[in-house]
Amino acid sequence: MVFQKINYKTDLNHRQKENYNFHKISSLLADYGFNCIRLSDDYEGADFLAIHINNSDILKIQLKGRLTFEAKYLEKNLYICFPYNGDWYLYPHDDLWKKVSLIHNAPNTISWSKGAYSFPKPNDPISILLNEYKLSVDDI
């Protein structure tokens, strides 16, 4: 068998991209002491659980393609994870939503009135907030 890398954007359908992203973030979270378990059905909005080696920290994580907030995720103690510009970000949904709401008009948009708001490309003030949630890649 010859191993040939795939092109994420052109070779994968939506479901395959979700699987690919799950494995990428699982690998990165292993560097932080987490074991990730994929859920066959969303649990309180989570696509997967990340269980820390200390056995007391369990994160419910929703995997997204970009910075996203949804009303249905509020008050569920949910984390959102997404890739952006070659980096991965993992943030507590409600905490970051409160911070974004203070500096951006997102809560007053038609999109949010329908239950969701996302940032395909975060502006500078939002990017500054995101820095706190950026996961770094460690060399093994």
Image (spheres, rainbow, N blue to C red):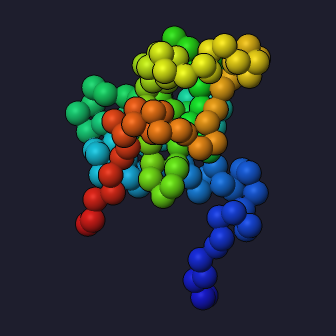
Please give left or right for residue 138 compared with residue 103 in the image: left
- Compare residues 114 and 12 and report the one nearer the observer: 114
Residue 48 as seen in the image, left or right of residue 117 = left
Is residue 47 shown to the viewer in this render? no
Based on the displayed image, in which of its 4 quarters is residue 34 positioned? top left
Is the residue 25 above or below the residue 52 in the image?
below
**The N terminus sits in image quarter:** bottom right
Furthest toward the bottom, the residue is: 2
Residue at screen point 73% across, 13% down: 113
Which quadrant of the figure has residue 44? top right
- Does residue 136 appear to the left or right of 19 in the view shown? left
> Residue 49: percent from the left, percent from the top?
47, 34
Q: Residue at x 66, y 71 (%)?
A: 7
Q: As rendered, which of 120 and 43 lies closer to the eye?
A: 120
Query: In the depicted view, which residue is nearer to us: 120 or 133?
Result: 120
Residue 115, how many percent across, how many down? 71, 17
Q: Residue at x 56, y 29 (%)?
A: 46
The residue nearer to you, when weighing 138 against 100, is: 100
Q: Residue 102: percent from the left, percent from the top?
A: 48, 15
Q: Could you tell me which quadrant the C terminus lies in?
A: bottom left
Q: Does 128 sit above or below residue 57? A: below
Q: Is residue 59 visible?
A: yes
Number of marks in the image?
0
Residue 119 position by quadrant: top right
